[in-house]
Image (spheres, rainbow, N blue to C red):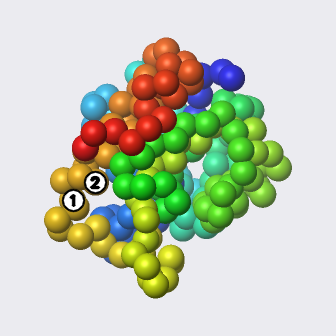
Amino acid sequence: MANPRLIACLGNPGKKYCMTWHNAGFWVADILAREAGVQFIDAGLFIATVLPDGPDLIKPADYMNRSGKAIAAFLDIKDYDADELLVVCDDVNLDLGHLRLRAGGSHGGHNGLRNIIECLGTEDFARLRIGIGPAPDGSDLADFVLDRVPEKLEEEASRMAHIAADCVGLFLQEGIIAAQEKHNRKPVL
């Protein structure tokens, strides 16, 4: 697998959603941009920037379950292949803080990944899933992922996002296997 030329971090636009679990991907994008000293530019379907050494970083401007259109458009504009894409998103099926980096695979019930797969016509792109689960027993899954992060978990969520950003950085520097070996486990938060 090639190193990613496009890092697409998923979330929902607007202040209403910024501190919800479903925006874990956006948190990682913000950390990557801040640490690199770059600013996002609004480009309509997405906001975008370029990280040092070339990878593009975007946050789709539409809702999570419709993010595939923006990603497909960006890949087309840049003439990148799907296997040059890394998607960063939350995953309620992973315990809080657990990271799982894979070179491909199914959507696993994640509507954002489902839409990307539909729009690209392939599952062959890397994805970094960030554990936000489990949802409390009896809770509605949609309500849980769109709930604000409880104040008592804000520090843990922040550390988790920083560790995920470190995982992306290691992937860019040393490749997917090195990043998997270090990060495909629950980190000590």
Residue 51 visible, this orientation: no
Task: Classify residue 76 by image quadrant.
Answer: top right
Q: Quadrant of the C terminus?
A: top left
Relative image position of residue 116 (x, y in whole percent): 69, 54
Look at label 1 and name its amino acid. Answer: Glu
Label of residue 157 in the image: 2
Relative image position of residue 48 (x, y in whole percent): 47, 43
Q: Nearer the viewer, residue 189 or 146?
A: 189
Look at label 2 and name its amino acid. Answer: Ala
Q: In which quarter of the image is the N terminus?
A: top right
Label of residue 162 in the image: none
In the image, 152: left or right of 89? Answer: left
Q: Name the residue under label 1.
A: 154
Residue 10 visible, this orientation: yes
- Residue shown at 50% from the left, 77% from the top: 142
- Residue shown at 23% from the left, 52% from the top: 156
On screen, residue 133 above or below 144: above
